[in-house]
């Protein structure tokens, strides 16, 4: 018999985790911008007051999504994606430039960032494409089409000078891998990243020498490799050409501040008062929290604004300083719990569309989680992306809410199919 409960089938664990994370985020935004002259937690002129409005709106948005017919998301996936692409083009023309990035539509006192909403639109379109008839990710033609769907929004976001948001789209490769993409593609991706890093750290000619030496060693140690001599030599030449081009790409494709941040991260240069300032102050703030933290509203790094962007990209510093290791670990566990929960729900789906969308959601959340927390402790580059459900900002909160609640609606519909 078909289950008509609909909204009552929503995964309650995910809902609770969502509400807890949003509440903790709001409390820490309050702490990050706290001022004794403006200490009313409901002051709508302050960031925490505005965030409260966005939280209320996101909850309403989530409820609306849960009430929509589940077939809507699959049927109109490409239309939603198309609207998203149009908005990304429009913001390049009429958008407002903030911090060097033309990524915002300004509406009164509020800003809307289309790049945040493009994530769920791309996730829907990719899920729709991969569930089309006769799709086989062993076939390059279908891989190419999937990469086009992923690449168009990423390219338009790059044109906005928002490399951080564009990099998020690289995680869709994990979704393709789950759906049958060869693992060799992932291995090649790791090799390319390694060549890029080692070329910056060493010298392109040294790296090319290492590539040629490894190719020669493969022929000596593995007799079967001689049967594939042409592909192996071809791959070696391609990797050598890539290593040779890294310096040019690094100098011409990246902005000065991006190059500085990468050099500081790799230890090529130290700049504690420039590109490395944020990360250095962030590590001081988190480290000073110790085991249990300094206490709510008692963080000195937070109170005296030593860490820039502490309510947005560096919100985790507030957690580390005021709530210490225990508080930081709690936030990490909650976020990991939500991601693991999403993967578990994705694996139980009867619909391939829902499963693929779920993996896309989990991948996006993991990228934001890993990069955001990583950059606050100096293990990933500072690329300016928010911590899911935690950082200040209406666009990111609404986008993550839409991402999550569409999947929860898809999961609830699974029971209606029984």
Image (cartoon, rainbow, N blue to C red):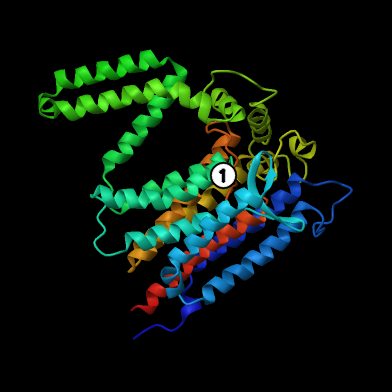
Establish if 35 lies above or below 202: below
Q: Can you name the residue that lies furthest to the front here? A: 93
Q: Quadrant of residue 398?
A: bottom right
Question: Which residue does the numbered mark 1 point to in the structure image?
Answer: 329
Establish if 63 lies above or below 137: below
| In-image side of 164 versus 213 (left or right) | right
- Residue at (24, 55) in percent of width and height: 136
Where residue 38 sits: x, y (%)?
Answer: 86, 51
- Residue at (62, 52) in percent of width and height: 91
- Residue at (58, 73) in percent of width and height: 64
Seen from the viewer's position, the closer of residues 56 and 318 is: 56
Seen from the viewer's position, the closer of residues 416 and 153 is: 153
Seen from the viewer's position, the closer of residues 235 and 265 is: 235
Secondary element under disc 1, as helix, strand or loop, is helix
Q: Can you name the residue that lies furthest to the bottom here? A: 1
Count of number-bearing discs: 1
State the quadrant of the N terminus.
bottom left
| In-image side of 173 versus 307 (left or right) | left
Q: Quadrant of residue 228?
A: top left
Where residue 135 sits: x, y (%)?
Answer: 26, 58
- Residue at (75, 39) in percent of width and height: 302
Seen from the viewer's position, the closer of residues 316 and 255 is: 255
Residue 389 visible, this angle: no
| In-image side of 2 versus 406 (left or right) | left
Where residue 217 sits: x, y (%)?
Answer: 20, 18
Establish if 197 lies above or below 286: above
State the quadrant of the C terminus.
bottom left
**Within-10-Å neighbours for mark 1: few <14, some 14–19, many 20+:** some
């Amino acid at each position: 018999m078909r289950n008509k409960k609909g909204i009552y089938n929503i995964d309650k664990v995910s809902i609770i985790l969502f509400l807890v994370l949003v509440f903790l985020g709001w409390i820490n935004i309050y702490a990050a911008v706290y001022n004794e002259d403006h200490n009313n937690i409901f002051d709508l002129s302050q960031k925490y007051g505005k965030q409260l409005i966005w939280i209320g709106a996101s909850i309403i948005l989530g409820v609306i999504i849960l009430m929509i017919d589940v077939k809507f998301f699959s049927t109109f996936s490409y239309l939603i994606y198309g609207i998203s692409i149009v908005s990304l083009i429009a913001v390049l023309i009429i958008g407002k430039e903030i911090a060097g990035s033309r990524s915002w539509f300004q509406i009164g006192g509020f800003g809307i960032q289309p790049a945040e909403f493009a994530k769920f639109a791309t996730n829907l379109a990719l899920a729709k494409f991969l569930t089309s008839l006769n799709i086989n990710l062993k076939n390059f033609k279908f891989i190419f089409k999937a990469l086009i769907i992923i690449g168009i929004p990423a390219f338009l976001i790059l044109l906005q000078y928002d490399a951080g948001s564009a990099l998020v789209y690289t995680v869709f490769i994990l979704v393709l891998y789950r759906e049958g993409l060869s693992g060799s593609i992932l291995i090649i991706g790791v090799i390319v990243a390694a060549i890029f890093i080692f070329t910056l750290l060493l010298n392109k000619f040294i790296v090319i020498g290492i590539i040629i030496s490894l190719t020669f060693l493969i022929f000596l140690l593995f007799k079967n490799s001689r049967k594939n001599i042409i592909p192996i030599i071809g791959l070696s030449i391609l990797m050598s050409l890539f290593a040779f081009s890294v310096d040019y790409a690094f100098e011409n494709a990246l902005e000065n501040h991006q190059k500085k941040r990468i050099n500081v991260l790799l230890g090529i240069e130290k700049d504690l008062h420039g590109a490395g300032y944020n990360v250095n102050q962030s590590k001081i703030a988190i480290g000073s929290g110790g085991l249990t933290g300094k206490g709510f509203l008692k963080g000195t790094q937070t109170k005296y604004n030593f860490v820039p962007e502490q309510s947005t990209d560096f919100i985790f510093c507030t957690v580390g300083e005021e709530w210490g290791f225990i508080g930081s670990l709690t936030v990490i566990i909650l976020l990991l719990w939500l991601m693991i929960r999403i993967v578990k729900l994705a694996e139980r789906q009867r619909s391939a569309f829902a499963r693929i969308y779920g993996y896309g959601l989990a991948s996006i959340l993991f990228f934001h989680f890993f990069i955001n927390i990583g950059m606050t402790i100096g293990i990933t580059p500072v690329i300016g992306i928010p911590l899911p459900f935690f950082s200040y900002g209406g666009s990111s909160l609404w986008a993550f809410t839409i991402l999550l609640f569409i999947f929860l609606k898809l999961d609830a519909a699974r029971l209606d199919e029984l």
